[in-house]
Amino acid sequence: MRLEFDPQADAVYLELTDAEVEESKEIQPGIIMDYDAEGRVVGIEVLYLSKPKCR
């Protein structure tokens, strides 16, 4: 497992496994799940970290 922060992109990526990403889906605005060939989650990206999500 590895966590990577990109301040320029205002994003964080949590890599759960070393498996190759076959598909990505935005499950909510600013949250992207990466899946391998078997449909298992291999990573999660969260965008717009500095912007408020709810009020």
Image (cartoon, grey):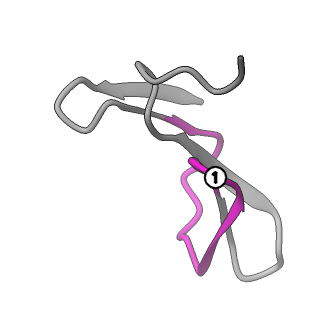
Q: Number of marks in the image?
A: 1
Q: Tell me what residue is drawn at x 59 percent, y 30 percent.
A: 1
What x and y, as percent, mark residue 43?
Answer: 61, 49
Q: Residue furthest right?
A: 39
6 horizontally vs 34: left or right: left
Per the image, label 1 sits on a secondary structure element best described as loop
Task: Give the residue type at disc 1.
Answer: Pro
Q: Position of residue 42 (x, y in %)?
A: 67, 54
Q: Residue at x 48, y 25 (%)?
A: 3
The vertical placement of 28 against 48, above or below, is below
Foreground residue among 8 and 36: 8
Q: Quadrant of residue 41?
A: bottom right
Q: Is residue 2 above or below residue 35?
A: above
Q: Residue furthest front?
A: 55
Left or right of 17 in this view: 54: right
Residue 22: image location, x then y, percent = 59, 81
Q: Vertically, is 1 above or below 52?
A: below
First to last magenta residue range: 13-32
Badge 1 crowding class, 10 Å Cα cut-off, few under 14, some 14 to 19, many 20 or more, is few
Residue found at the very far left of the displayed protein: 8
| Foreground pick, 7 / 48 | 48
Q: Quarter of the image containing the C terminus?
A: top right
Q: Quadrant of residue 38?
A: bottom right
- In the displayed structure, would residue 10 be above or below residue 26? above
Q: Is residue 42 left or right of residue 39?
A: left
Look at mark 1 in the image and give the residue it sits on: 29
Relative side of 35 to 47, left or right: right
Residue 9 location (% of width, % of height): 25, 38
Q: Is residue 17 inside the magenta stretch? A: yes
- The residue drawn where x is 82% and y is 74% is 39
